[in-house]
Image: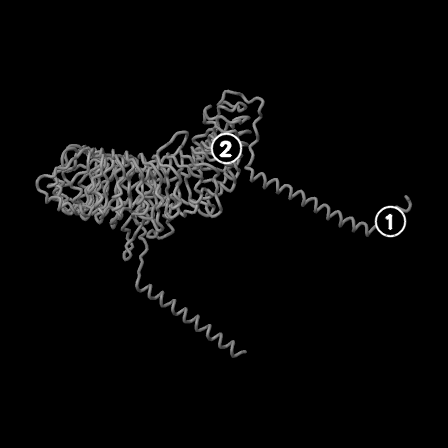
């Protein structure tokens, strides 16, 4: 036995020794192959000083994914590990600062310590609010700067005059993006030589103050690959010197007021051009000329944007663009799609929305088997949806034919393995049932069939979709009960609109728990990028417009900048009866709750006081009774409130948000009183502020538990004492009883 123990000990020792040796070897090897210098103290101090010159405001950034990166900037840690900071691995000097969408608000200090970071190679301050301040001239001291991004999503965060002279010092500047700032580009020194501007390859001046014309010094940027001058109200004809920038691969002039003709002979000189943006308000036409060889030189263009150009037909030269993958020709006056378009098998994105298209959708559209994004919305298309649209492309992710006059059923063909993420059939004349084959769309995030004539029961089977976030069935003929079996629980649903249908059911707790994705977890609070975010960067579901009833009117949401925080349930204009379950108060992520124009009875649940994110609550046109719960006064974000035309009684709570609403929110309740209705509440004493029902139940339960404990202790104690005393005085008690009886 002793030998076995000794042997086991020896083996264990060898294993531990070899493990330690292996670990040491790894450590030694790591130390010899990597060498990390910590951030220099003076650079750390400079960054901290820059941080202190701004405050954090969620309104300073427009991007819904913004967050305050500087919160991680702690003087006790290495600044090379801070969010948005990159250091040179050998020297430890700060070489890159990315504070884009960091919710910074404040003015740019001309003497900011930021400009002492002379080793900086990349600086990104885009999408913050610099409160109309100017770009300090000291930026020219960052002589190693290659990338400079100060673009914005909103106007006038930077303003004033921007001297070209400072950029002459940035001799290796490669990328300059100053988009959406009201900056005037001038030269302070009349003798400045604009021919020696830095070798900029990427220049973004979208939405800047260019005074109606393109700066002539741009013609000296012979190294330019990308030029973005969109949304500047530029007028007149497109200057010819742009067509001499032979290295251009991207030219974006969209969103201006250019007029006249573009000679294809001139355009064909840009033989490296792959992306051309001319839409968004320009009134242009193309002069093809006698030389047909020019279209050969344009064949390399793969992205063409011609929206809002007042075209009445497709420009002919498009048919010669053999590499075309993206075509946007929306917001024009085009009535027909030429047959040659269906031969563009390279097309991945086709947008012909908001035109005057007539007739039926040609089945030849299914030749475009590479399509990822198809948008034919807001036209005058009639007839049935081609059956092949459900199966013609294994790559199709976005299908939008809304706002037409299409009739018939939705095709049943939706093959397994499809990658559809967005389907919008809204505002047509479609009827019948939703095809059960939609269950094969396992990546579906957005389904909108509102404003049609569908006659079907509640499609509970959509609840099995693992990614469905937006479901709109509004204004159809759906009917019956709203069922939600256990395995169909809509795990990621954020918006459900069932309004203006014929649903007749009681709203049970089981139905409410189908929407448990609208509950903020104590462990994890999902933000928008967990909610509506495409897995494929080729399409942008976040920018897809969406409309829903909000604050009593139908509101259009142009995209993620308004929709990113929306969590909504709209069951209005149905025949839903019974009481509103208390458990609905657990959906604390809700922003909009509309239960109006139904047959609800009973009282307003006091648990609604837990809906801390609620902005809209509409309970009007029901048969609700009782008092308005005092707990609703704690809804600090409530912006729209309507309980009109019910059977409510008692006083309207006077404190909190409820005191800000006028009589329209409370009318039609004959026993309701308050200053909003000009009806005094003399006979109605104010109810005391009560805690939510759950707390009351727990407190009453605790009270009864305490009482029973006291009774039990008293009973046991009395019994023990009685036995003890009885044993001690048993003889005396016996004698006493004998005398009495």
Q: Residue at x 51, y 36 (%)?
A: 506
Depth check, front residue: 526 or 550:
550
Residue under numbered circle 1: 732
Task: List x then y, in percent, for residue 498.
Answer: 43, 36
Residue 639: % across, % down? 43, 31
- Whether pointer 1 and pointer 2 mark residues with C-beta atoms closer than 8 Å, the reply is no
Residue 399 sits in quarter: top left
Q: Is residue 247 left or right of residue 536?
A: left
Residue 129 placement: quadrant: top left
How far apart marks 1 and 2 lie (CA) works out to 68 Å
Q: Is residue 224 visible?
A: no
Q: Is residue 60 above or below residue 39?
A: above
* Numbered label tally: 2
- Left or right of 238 on screen, residue 329: right
Q: Which residue is mark 2?
A: 632
Going from the N terminus, do you reach mark 1 or mark 2 first?
Answer: 2
Neighbour tally class for label 1: few under 14, some 14-19, many 20 plus, Cα within 10 Å: few
Q: Is residue 28 above or below residue 383?
A: below
Which secondary structure lies at badge 1? helix
Label of residue 464 in the image: none
Location of the N terminus by quadrant is bottom right
């Amino acid at each position: 036995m002793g030998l076995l123990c000794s042997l086991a000990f020896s083996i264990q020792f060898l294993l531990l020794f070899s493990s330690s040796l292996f670990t040491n070897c790894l450590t030694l090897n790591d130390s010899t192959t990597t060498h990390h210098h910590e951030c220099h103290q003076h650079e750390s101090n400079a960054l901290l000083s820059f941080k202190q010159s701004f405050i954090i405001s969620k309104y300073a950034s427009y991007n819904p994914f913004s967050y305050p990166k500087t919160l991680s900037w702690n003087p006790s840690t290495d600044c090379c590990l801070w969010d948005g900071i990159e250091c040179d691995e050998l020297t430890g000097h700060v070489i890159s600062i990315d504070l884009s969408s960091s919710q910074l608000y404040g003015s740019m200090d001309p003497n900011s310590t930021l400009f002492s970071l002379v080793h900086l190679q990349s600086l990104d301050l885009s999408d913050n609010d610099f409160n109309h301040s100017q770009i300090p001239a000291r930026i020219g001291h960052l002589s190693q700067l290659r990338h400079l991004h100060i673009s914005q999503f909103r106007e006038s965060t930077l303003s004033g005059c921007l001297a070209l002279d400072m950029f002459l010092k940035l001799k290796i500047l490669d990328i300059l993006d100053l988009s959406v700032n009201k900056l005037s580009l001038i030269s302070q020194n009349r003798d400045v030589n604009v021919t020696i501007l830095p070798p900029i390859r990427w220049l973004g001046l979208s939405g800047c103050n260019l005074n109606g014309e393109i700066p002539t010094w741009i013609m000296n940027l012979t190294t330019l690959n990308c030029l973005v001058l969109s949304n500047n109200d530029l007028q007149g004809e497109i200057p010819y010197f742009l067509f001499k920038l032979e290295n251009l691969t991207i030219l974006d002039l969209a969103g201006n007021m250019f007029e006249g003709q573009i000679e294809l002979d001139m355009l064909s000189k840009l033989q490296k051009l792959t992306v051309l943006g001319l839409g968004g308000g320009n009134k242009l036409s193309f002069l093809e000329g006698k030389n047909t060889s020019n279209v050969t030189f344009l064949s390399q263009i793969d992205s063409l944007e011609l929206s809002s150009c007042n075209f009445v037909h497709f420009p002919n030269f498009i048919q010669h663009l053999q590499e075309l993958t993206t075509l946007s020709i929306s917001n024009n006056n085009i009535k027909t799609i030429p047959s040659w378009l269906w031969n563009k098998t390279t097309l991945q994105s086709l947008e012909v929305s908001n035109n005057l298209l007539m007739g039926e959708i040609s089945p030849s559209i299914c030749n475009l088997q590479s399509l990822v994004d198809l948008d034919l919305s807001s036209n005058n298309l009639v007839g049935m949806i081609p059956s092949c649209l459900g199966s013609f492309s294994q790559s199709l992710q976005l299908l939008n034919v809304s706002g037409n006059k299409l009739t018939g059923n939705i095709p049943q063909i939706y093959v397994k393995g499809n990658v559809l993420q967005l389907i919008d059939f809204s505002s047509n004349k479609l009827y019948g049932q939703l095809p059960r084959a939609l269950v094969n769309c396992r990546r579906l995030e957005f389904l909108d069939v509102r404003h049609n004539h569908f006659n079907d029961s509640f499609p509970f089977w959509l609840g099995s979709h693992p990614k469905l976030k937006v479901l709109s069935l509004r204004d159809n003929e759906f009917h019956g009960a709203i069922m939600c079996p256990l395995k169909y629980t809509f795990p990621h649903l954020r918006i459900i609109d069932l309004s203006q249908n014929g649903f007749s059911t009681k709203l049970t707790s089981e139905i409410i728990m189908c929407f448990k994705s609208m509950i903020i977890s104590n462990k994890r609070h999902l933000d928008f990028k967990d909610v509506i975010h495409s897995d494929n960067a080729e399409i942008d579901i976040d920018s897809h417009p969406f409309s829903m009833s909000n604050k009593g009117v139908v509101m259009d949401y142009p995209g993620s900048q308004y929709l990113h925080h929306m969590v909504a349930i709209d069951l209005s204009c149905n025949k839903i009866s019974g009481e509103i379950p208390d458990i609905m108060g657990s959906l604390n992520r809700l922003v909009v709750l509309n239960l109006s124009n139904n047959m609800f009875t009973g009282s307003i649940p006091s648990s609604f006081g837990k809906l801390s994110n609620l902005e809209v609550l509409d309970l009007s046109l029901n048969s609700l009774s009782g008092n308005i719960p005092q707990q609703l006064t704690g809804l600090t974000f409530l912006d729209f409130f309507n309980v009109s035309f019910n059977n409510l009684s008692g006083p309207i709570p006077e404190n909190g948000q409820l005191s800000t609403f006028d009589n329209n929110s409370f009318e039609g309740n004959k026993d309701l009183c308050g200053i909003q209705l000009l009806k005094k509440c003399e006979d109605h004493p104010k109810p005391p502020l009560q805690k939510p029902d759950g707390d009351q139940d727990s407190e009453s339960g605790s009270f009864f538990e305490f009482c029973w404990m006291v009774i039990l202790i008293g009973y046991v104690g009395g019994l023990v004492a009685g036995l003890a005393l009885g044993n001690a005085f048993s003889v005396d008690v016996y004698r006493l009883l004998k005398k009495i009886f």
